[in-house]
Image (cartoon, grey):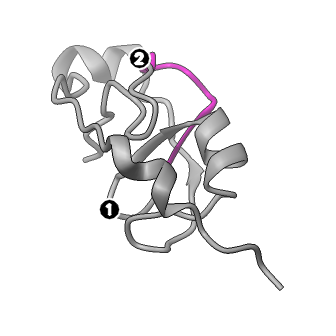
Amino acid sequence: MLDLRPNCECCDRDLAVADPDVYICTFECTWCGSCARDVHRMICPNCAGELVRRPVRPAEALRHNPASTVRVFNPDCLGRVPAPAG
């Protein structure tokens, strides 16, 4: 089951559980849409994996399986921007 982390790992912005503009990699590194698109170009700076939209967990399922409250923040993420493709 996905953790549904509460913040962007790069800018530390709070992310709502139902926000459709949140992206994750296969290791659940979590990014707001702005950081995913504009900073990381849809590539995870931690594992070089593809960033995809995080699914929204239905409200009923959240009652029994709540989102994580553990924040992951890596302020050095801006120094790990992927090289341009090409």
Residue at 70% across, 47% down: 37
Given the image, on which type of amino acid does mark 1 rest? Phe
Q: Residues within 10 Å of mark 1 (few under 14, many from 20)?
A: few
Q: Is residue 5 left or right of residue 58?
A: left
Give the label, 2 or 1, closer to the camera: 2
Report the amino acid beneath label 2. Asp
**Image coords of residue 58 (percent x, y):** 43, 22
Q: Mark 2 or 1 closer to N-term?
A: 2
For the residues bearing labels 2 and 1, Cβ distance under 8 angstroms: no
User: From the viewer's perspective, is 3 left or right of 37?
Assistant: left
Give the CA distance from mark 2 to mark 1. Answer: 19 Å
The rendered magenta stretch, by its main secondary structure, is classed as loop
Work out whether 14 lies above or below 49: above
Tell me which corner region of the image, top left, top right, bottom left or bottom right, holds residue 40.
bottom right
Question: What residue sits right under mark 2 in the picture?
Answer: 14
22 magenta-colored: yes
Name the element at disc 2. Answer: loop
Q: In which quarter of the image is the C terminus?
A: bottom right
Please give the label number shown on residue 2.
none
Seen at 21% across and 22% down, the residue is: 66
Magenta region: which residues? Answer: 14-24
**Res. 5 image quadrant:** top left
Q: Is the residue 59 above or below the residue 47 in the image?
A: above
Residue labelled with disc 1: 27
